[in-house]
Structures are given as C-alpha cells and as structure tokens.
Amino acid sequence: MQPIFLVDAMLGTLARWLRILGYDAEYTGDIPDSEIVRRARAEGRLILTRDRELAFHRKGVKAIFIRSEDLGEQLAQLRDDLGLSYSVTGARCPECNVPLEPISREKAKTLVPPYVYRTQEEFKQCPKCGRVYWKATHWEKMNSRLLELLR
Ligand SMILES: [Zn+2]
C-alpha cells in the first residue's frame, strides 16, 4: 500500500485510525496546496482530502476525495476504493506514525502498571514518543470499535 498523506483539518481522526490499522499515514492541518503537492510527490504519498479543488485539479500526484465527514463512512470508502483491509495490528504509533518496536518484559516492567505487567506477555514501544502498547485491552477494544464503525 502506497503511503498516505491526509491534508484536511477534518481528517485527523481518520489519520489516527489508519495508523492503528498499520498504514503509513502522515497528517497535516492547514498548509498551502503547493506545499502539500510538493511533499506528496517527494515522498510518493497518496493524498486524501475533503477539498474538491485539491482532489480533482492537481496534476502529477494521486489524490482521493473523501466524501463523508463520518469516520465509519470514511473507512468504508477506503476499503471499497483502495481495497484496504482492516485489522488492528499494533504495528504503528497512532500519535506519531512511527513503527512500534518490541521491548522485553523486563524493560516494560518499569513503564506499565503492575497489573498489566503481570497479565501481558508482549509489549511494544514507540521509539519517538516512548508510549508503551500491549495487546489485551487496547487492540481488542479497537477491533470491536472498528467493527461497529463499519457496520
Ligand atoms: Zn509515538
């Protein structure tokens, strides 16, 4: 899957979700169209936008117009238009768009609540912001929320 560039203030939530689902999804709020196109071209990114002008009248970069303001409908559109498949993998930090790295239980011990340490086997950490993620609650809750959104 081509890396993605979300460029509309309305698309911040979708960006987080795409990262949770393992996709490389950079996000920016309000910057000039020329800068958006320059970055998309330089990084080979597919632009997702709610701006018709940007989606339909830019030459040389691929862009998709996101039709709905509703998160569930946005995810459904990308599933249908791009064939994205959705499952929560915990591959990427939802805040930073950086791939997560596995860390040992010993290292995790000082970073997570005691109950989590006792009940979980696998931990991952974001090398950029330092947040620690584990499977149980995070990913299961997100998977059921995802199913709700796509219903
Ligand atoms: Zn992070």
Image: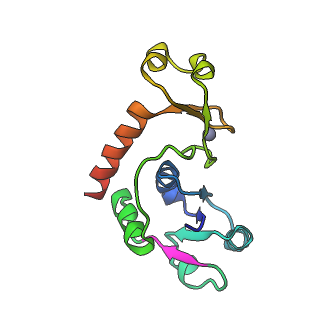
Image quadrant occupied by the N terminus: bottom right
Image quadrant occupied by the C terminus: bottom left
Task: Inspect the magenta stretch and tell me whether residue 28 lies in it.
Answer: no
Q: Which residues are magenta?
A: 62-66
Q: Quadrant of ligand 1?
A: top right
Q: Residue 75 appears in which quarter of the rendering?
A: bottom left
Residue at the outermost top position: 114
Judged left or right of residue 12, residue 5 is right
- The overriding secondary structure of the stretch rendered in magenta is strand
Rendered location of residue 116, percent (x, y)? 45, 20
Rendered location of residue 16, percent (x, y)? 51, 50
Q: Tell me which residue sits at (74%, 70%) in the image.
A: 42
Q: Tell me which residue sits at (37%, 72%) in the image.
A: 80
For this rendering, which residue is in front, 58 or 141? 141
Rendered location of residue 112, percent (x, y)? 53, 20
Q: Tell me which residue sits at (61%, 18%) in the image.
A: 106
Rendered location of residue 6, percent (x, y)? 56, 62
Judged left or right of residue 67, residue 33 is right
